[in-house]
Image: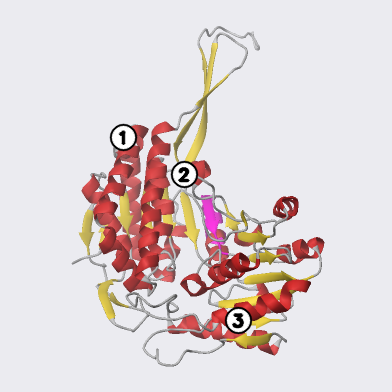
Amino acid sequence: MPELFIGGTWRSALDGRTREIRCPADGSLVGVVDEGGGKDTVEAVGAARRAFDEGPWPGTPAAERGDLLLRVADLMVRDKAELARAESLDTGKRLVESAYDVDDVINSFRHFGRLAANETGRVIDTGSPSVDSRVVHEPVGVCALITPWNYPLLQTAWKVAPALAAGNTFVLKPSELTPHTAIHLMRLLEEAGLPAGVANLVLGAGPEAGAPLADHPDVDLLSFTGGLRTGRRLMAAAAGTVKKVALELGGKNPNIVFADADFDTAVDMALTAVFLHSGQVCSAGARLLVEDPLHDRFVDEIVRRARRIRLGGPFDEGAQTGPLISEAHRAKVDAYVARGVAEGAVLRCGGARPEGLDDGFYYLPTVLDECDARMSVVQEESFGPVLTVERFTDETEAVRLANDTVYGLAGAVFTTDEAKARRVAARLRIGTVWINDYHPYVAQAEWGGFKQSGLGRELGPSGLAEYREAKHIYRNTDPSPQGWFA
């Protein structure tokens, strides 16, 4: 069955290429999908442009757009098991994690569906009874949405839902490694009654199918979630047409544990922070900063428990985490660990492939102790199950170390001193701060980073604002000549 969705029609790639999708857990064949290229992308942009300029969607009342998103959420509830299974097969993550992710996707569609229905402009008081001045919000236009492989459906929802809520049309280019839930979503949008051409899907590799979106003159907004280097290239390409750009480019996130923290909770959360989904999480707490008096006891316990983490595939009910996405990615993670050891880090556990799981791309949970902030494994995003440990002596040093990176996405503070927690949270240059917790988020709160973690925000009211333009309409209700040039 054709998997490109362009102008309301399912079709194959123009050059007939296909790609095999294999499960990272065991190499089994998940499916064969169409592999689009630049010509397919250009055609999809044209369809989205026509749908925006000539179609009904931008002028559809906001409440009706919101109702469609709520219908899509209901359809996802119906198809939850199928979506979770497809997500797990593509990514290799545990089925229970994928089920949680689908719940979050449903919540995101409902959040933006309700927000669309309730969003209004504002009236400006000019002080003149003969002036009607108001600010209204209109859709940006054609949106290019490029999403990653680690949370394929969730990251897609964070872009598609607000884009539709605001009245835009879009071209979605998911990761070529994990396309199946994006295909399913397009079918649900079609079933929900979205007009033809509003939603367009192009599968394929980034350089061929994704890159043409960045400099296309008919694309009004580019939203990308992925790596920093790719984000920089896309931003540079988008500059030629001065289009709006929204970027979420990952992080090197500090998890600060003070000596007065609740020990058991902090250990448990530190493990979850970095080893969930084998560390393939943009907000992973991959940098553990431990106050010096607590360091030895805390790290010993982290190492003891990390060695016990059971790896396995999506449907292994005893597994606690899964594989990496590909052999190339595993080699990258391994190279970071080797470089860290060469730079002076102490390998406490992991740093190798596990025995007995030869068919998948597994990597042992790894702890690198006695790290220094200048090490590449500390500064750069390995995006794997690798925890680096740094010591600090006081609050000031903890903040300095935590902020000593080009990233600023997320991080946490563990302490029983509430005043200290508030002080440190206020001084961290990051977009999300957890206090005595790690990883939870809600769709109603903004998500995004400081510094080179990106531009703009997803979720919350700001997530909808990214896909809107503000327009000021000033009406003189009692016009008369002014006489400037009589």
Measured along the vertical axis of the image, is residue 436 above or below residue 31? Answer: above
Of residues 107 and 183, the one drawn nearer to the viewer in this rendering: 107
Residue segment shown in magenta: 236-250
Residue under the point 34% across and 67% down? 87
**Which of the 4 image quarters holds residue 311?**
bottom left
Q: CA distance from mark 1 to mark 2?
A: 17 Å
- Quarter holding the C terminus? top right
Residue type at the position of mark 3: Val
Disc 3, disc 1: CB below 8 Å?
no
Q: Point out residue 276 in the picture as x, y percentages from the top left corner.
A: 49, 70
Q: Point out residue 397 in the picture as x, y percentages from the top left corner.
A: 80, 65
**Local SS, label 3:** helix
* Mark positioned earlier in the residue sequence (3 or 2): 3
Q: Point out residue 339 in the picture as x, y percentages from the top left corner.
A: 65, 86
Q: Is residue 168 visible?
A: no
Residue type at the position of mark 2: Tyr
Q: Which mark is residue 37?
A: none
Q: Does residue 249 belong to the magenta stretch?
A: yes
Q: Which residue is mark 2?
A: 467
Q: Which residue is mark 1?
A: 64
**Which of the 4 image quarters holds residue 387?**
bottom right
Q: Which residue is mark 3?
A: 303
Residue type at the position of mark 1: Glu
Of residues 88 and 60, the one drawn nearer to the viewer in this rendering: 88
Disc 3, disc 2: CB below 8 Å?
no
Name the side, left or right, on which 353 lies relative to 379.
left
Observer-side mark, 1 or 2, equals: 1
Crowd rating for badge 3 (residues with CA inside 10 Å; few <14, some 14–19, many 20+): some
Q: Is residue 364 visible?
A: yes
**Local SS, label 2:** loop
